[in-house]
Image (cartoon, helix red, strand yellow):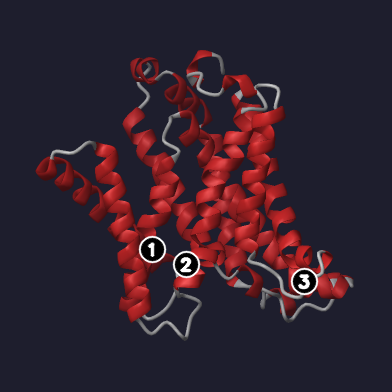
Amino acid sequence: MGDEFVQLSLTPLAIGVLAAVACALPGNFLILRRQALIGDAISHVVLPGIVVAFLITGKISTWPMMLGAAGASIVAVVLIEMIKRLGRIEPGAAMGVTFTSLFAAGVFLLEQSDTSSVHLDVEHALYGNLESLIWLSADGWGSLLDPQALADLPPELFRMTVVTLLIAVLTALFWRPLKLSTFDEGFASTLGIPTATLSFGLVGAAAIAAVAAFDAVGSIIVIAMFICPPAAARLMTNRLEAQVAWSIAFAAVSAVLGYVIAGYGPLWLGGTDAVSAAGMIATVSGMILGLTCLFAPHRSRIGVPPGSEQS
């Protein structure tokens, strides 16, 4: 049983947890800045950028994907400004039109492209390919010490590990300015903190997390993890440090429980087929948020401006 777990479930679980944590970390600050839907927007915008990068290079690799996502983000900003100015409509409507249109364009490009050689199609764009990221060369727990077996680990694991560690280190390095600018941007500016640069960097970190996680877990987990674990953590405490810790715990629990329930839940209920791991992870994260809305000690703070009581 242990050998089968290491070979078939260890790496998908690890990748799912890393992706969830990488998205939850910047998600905390996006929630507190009332910019939670930026994570949703990023997950929509990156799709056409990634597809175009694949069509140009013919392969799925980190830097072309990053550049493609960055290019798509720039196009999105330009389109939003054009729609706002030419159509004279409010920013939220312009953003909604732009993001859904770009996502639809990405889906159309996927449908019209030959992506049979890689894990890139409409289904993988939504749900990822988490279940397929298995470690075939593993032969029990001893493989964790076998260099030859380790060399055959799914590359997504290495990518998500690096990105998660990078975001964690950047969060620690810029903790104080991020905290000050999140709760009192005017005061942070008087201290000489470059608030606009920090905001851009925060969105950039969220974009990096989204792009890195996109191939493995798809857009559904990315959207859910930017919002659900930080929002649930917000209801558990009135201190930022504790909120971040809670969000990491909720993200990890969502990934583990979601993956296990997706694989074994239908069997427990008498079914024969597993369900999407990405979809179930997102469902579990939503259920955790629902439970905190009902039972968390600070649930009465819903709608209270974050800067008014958290420090």
Contact, mark 2 vs mark 1 (Cβ under 8 Å)? yes
Residue beneath the point at 30% across and 77% down: 56
First along the sequence among labels 3 and 1 = 1
**As drawn, 184 above or below 7:** above
Amino acid type at circle 3 is Gly
Residue position marked by numbered label 1 in the rendering: 47
Location of residue 178 in the rendering, given as x and y in whole percent from the top left corner: 47, 29
Instruction: Find residue 271 and name its label.
Output: 3
Q: Which residue carries the number 2 mark?
A: 125
Looking at the rendered image, the disc whose residue lies closer to the viewer, 3 or 1, is 3
Q: Secondary structure at mark 3?
A: loop
Measure the alpha-carbon separation of dots 3 and 1.
33 Å
Q: Nearer the viewer, residue 4 or 195?
A: 4
- Give the answer, above or below, for where 184 lies relative to 72: above
Q: Residue furthest right?
A: 1
2 or 1: tag closer to the N-terminus: 1
Residue at (43% x, 31% y) in the render: 34
Residue drawn at 32 percent across, 74 percent down: 109
Residue 49 seen anywhere in this rendered image of the structure: no
Is disc 1 placed on a helix, strand or loop? helix
Q: Position of residue 128 (x, y in %)?
A: 54, 67
Q: Label 2 neighbourhood size at 10 Å, few (<14), some (14-19), many (20+)?
A: many
Q: Secondary structure at mark 2?
A: helix
